[in-house]
Amino acid sequence: MWLEKLTDGVLQLDTPIGPRYLHLNLLQRVYLLWTFRNFSSLPQQVLRPRERRLIDDLWSDNRFVSMPATGAPGRPVIGRIERRAPVHAEVLPIRKPSSASNPAVAEQSREAASA
């Protein structure tokens, strides 16, 4: 299996429109085989900057290849990159402390409740 991936492997990118496959040269296949040695799929966020640059360069070079329909034998997939949209943290406004945290207000509430 390693030899097949080394000679003719492709890289799968998950995109919103479905999987895309990138053609690689021998050096890129060796490098990515090492990257995916323990995993078959990795999110793009966990890649090192050099690996991210390689993926972005391959994406911008438009080196896509077509794969046969599901079930038909095709090129071996070296690994899969999950290209997720960046998650933006929601910024919440600062909340004022509740009146129960103020001891004077809490004391007045207790007195009113006991009367």
Image (cartoon, rainbow, N blue to C red):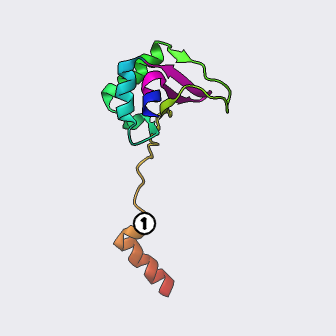
Looking at the picture, how far across and down is residue 76, in whole percent? Answer: 52, 29
16 is within the stretch colored magenta:
yes
Say above or below: 64 vs 18: above
Kind of residue indicated by mark 1: Ser
Looking at the picture, how far across and down is residue 93, in whole percent? Answer: 44, 46
Q: Quadrant of residue 65?
A: top right
Looking at the picture, how far across and down is residue 40, in whole percent? Answer: 46, 39
Say above or below: 72 vs 64: below
> At x 40% / y 50%, what residue is drawn?
94
Foreground of the two, 2 or 44: 2
Disc 1, SS: helix
Q: Bounds of the magenta span? A: 5-24
Is residue 99 among the parts visible in the rendering?
yes
> At x 50% / y 13%, what residue is drawn?
62
Q: Is residue 91 left or right of residue 69?
A: left
7 is within the stretch colored magenta:
yes
Q: Main secondary structure of the magenta part?
A: strand
> At x 35% / y 73%, what residue is drawn?
103
Q: Is residue 76 left or right of residue 32?
A: right
Labels in figure, total: 1
Location of mark 1 (residue): 99
Foreground of the two, 51 or 91: 51
Is residue 115 among the parts visible in the rendering?
no
Say above or below: 74 vs 96: above
Looking at the picture, how far across and down is residue 105, in whole percent? Answer: 40, 71
The residue sitting at the top extreme is: 61
Label 1 crowd bin: few (<14), some (14–19), many (20+), radius 10 Å:
few
The residue sitting at the bottom extreme is: 115
